[in-house]
Image (cartoon, helix red, strand yellow):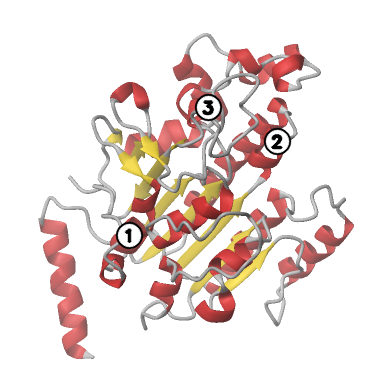
């Protein structure tokens, strides 16, 4: 025990004295399903601020909320936390104008293949649909679950119920809360009781996807109740509203996701267990089409749906801002998550990609 404490202390001192970013004690990983890089880097797309392509009934009201003259202004009003804080103190990958694309490599360009790639570090040709079949691959959260430092202190909350199959808790042993299932975390806290009651009274608009607000509330309460070392939160309304061709609600969902990120960041910075000891990674599972006709779609045939974005902030992440001349892949996310916690996920399988270059 003493030797381990001394080793940790020496490693911490070397970390502080070196120019290399330090490993994190904790990790928060958030995904915004199907949220395009175009809005991340440019804000509201003028070609979709209409009824025909965007399904927008009240265009003046939407423009009042999200339209500004320049892309820099538009992206900041849409995602103020991302652009006012994360980009200034962390990193953002995926801006093609900077010779820095981020891409899926699975060729499918839809959700299950994308989540598999980001969680296991490589594409798998066996995954050809969104059917809720248990994932045969060991994901990075499962890898961390096998580590005594993280075992029992990892949780996943997601709006989409297929995430249960993707993370495969029957094998992985992870705590996975998805979709419309009531929180089963006995004994329930008063807040969890309230969340379950609220969920039971909401309309089931999508049978396989609960409202983001429910997932966000559950994840925040889990953090306060259990102090997990690793927390994954998967939000889904951006994808659902895009498929419904409701560009107004798609933008609203993205802005609420950004607000949730701010709340999570401020919450972790208010808690001694997390303050200055936590890394954040935020990304999406796939892109979407490039045009007014195709922006709702994503598939192997959809041009442009392979392009995504990846953001990182906090411990282990140097403040390099929007990256230039660095191309990234979705398969780099899993090893990056482990690497931020000082673990080598790549040792599990030679197919696993290399981590993203987040240190100076």
Q: Looking at the picture, how far across and down is residue 261, in whole percent?
A: 53, 46
Q: Secondary structure at mark 2?
A: helix
Label 2 vs label 3, nearer the camera: 2
Q: Looking at the picture, how far across and down is residue 93, in whole percent?
A: 35, 37
The answer to whether residue 90 of the structure is visible from this angle is no
Q: Rounded to the nearest whole Å, what is the CA distance between mark 1 and mark 3?
A: 26 Å
Q: Secondary structure at mark 1?
A: helix
Q: Looking at the picture, how far across and down is residue 346, in whole percent?
A: 27, 65
Can you say which quadrant of the picture contains the N terminus?
bottom left
Residue 68 vs residue 96, the one in the foreground = 96
- From the image, tell me which residue sits under label 3: 39
Residue positioned most to the bottom: 1
Label 1 vs label 2, nearer the camera: 2
Crowd band around label 3 with a 10 angstrom C-alpha radius: few (<14), some (14–19), many (20+): some
Contact? badges 1 and 3 (CB < 8 Å): no
Residue 197, quarter of picture: bottom right
Q: Residue at x 86, y 53 (%)?
A: 202
- From the image, tell me which residue sits under label 1: 335
- Of the numbered discs 1 and 2, the one sitting upstream in the chain is 2
Left or right? Give the position of 59 relative to 78.
Answer: right
Left or right? Give the position of 109 relative to 330.
Answer: right
- From the image, tell me which residue sits under label 2: 243
Crowd band around label 1 with a 10 angstrom C-alpha radius: few (<14), some (14–19), many (20+): many
Label 1 vs label 3, nearer the camera: 1
Q: Residue at x 31, y 59 (%)?
A: 340
């Amino acid at each position: 025990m003493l030797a381990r404490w001394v080793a940790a202390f020496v490693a911490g001192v070397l970390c502080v004295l070196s120019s290399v970013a330090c490993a994190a004690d904790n990790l928060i990983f958030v995904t915004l399903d199907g949220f395009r890089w175009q809005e991340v880097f440019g804000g509201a797309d003028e070609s979709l601020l209409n009824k025909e392509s965007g399904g927008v009934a009240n265009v003046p009201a939407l423009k009042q909320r999200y339209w500004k003259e320049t892309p820099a202004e538009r992206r900041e009003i849409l995602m103020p936390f991302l652009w006012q804080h994360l980009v200034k103190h962390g990193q953002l990958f995926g801006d093609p104008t900077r010779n820095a694309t981020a891409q899926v490599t699975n060729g499918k360009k839809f959700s299950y293949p994308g989540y598999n790639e980001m969680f296991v570090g490589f594409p798998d040709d066996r995954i050809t649909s969104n059917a809720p079949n248990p994932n045969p691959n060991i994901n990075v959260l499962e890898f961390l679950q096998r580590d005594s430092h993280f075992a029992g202190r990892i949780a996943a909350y997601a709006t989409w119920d297929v995430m249960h199959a993707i993370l495969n808790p029957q094998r992985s042993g992870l705590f996975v809360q998805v979709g419309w299932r009531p929180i089963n975390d006995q004994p329930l806290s008063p807040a969890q009781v309230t969340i379950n009651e609220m969920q039971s009274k909401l309309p089931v608009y999508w049978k396989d996807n609960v409202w983001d607000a429910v997932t966000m509330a559950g994840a925040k309460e889990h953090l306060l109740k259990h102090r997990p070392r690793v927390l994954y939160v998967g939000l889904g309304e951006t994808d659902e509203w895009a498929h419904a061709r409701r560009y107004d609600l798609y933008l609203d969902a993205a802005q609420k996701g950004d607000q949730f990120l701010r709340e999570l960041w401020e919450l972790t910075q208010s808690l001694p267990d997390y303050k200055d000891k936590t890394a954040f990674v935020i990304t999406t599972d796939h892109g979407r089409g490039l045009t007014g006709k195709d922006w709702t779609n994503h598939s192997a045939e959809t041009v442009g749906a392979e392009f995504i974005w990846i953001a990182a902030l906090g411990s282990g992440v140097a403040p390099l801002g929007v990256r230039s001349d660095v191309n990234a892949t979705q398969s780099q996310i899993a090893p990056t998550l482990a690497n931020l916690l000082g673990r080598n996920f790549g040792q599990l399988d030679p197919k696993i990609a290399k981590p993203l270059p987040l240190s100076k």
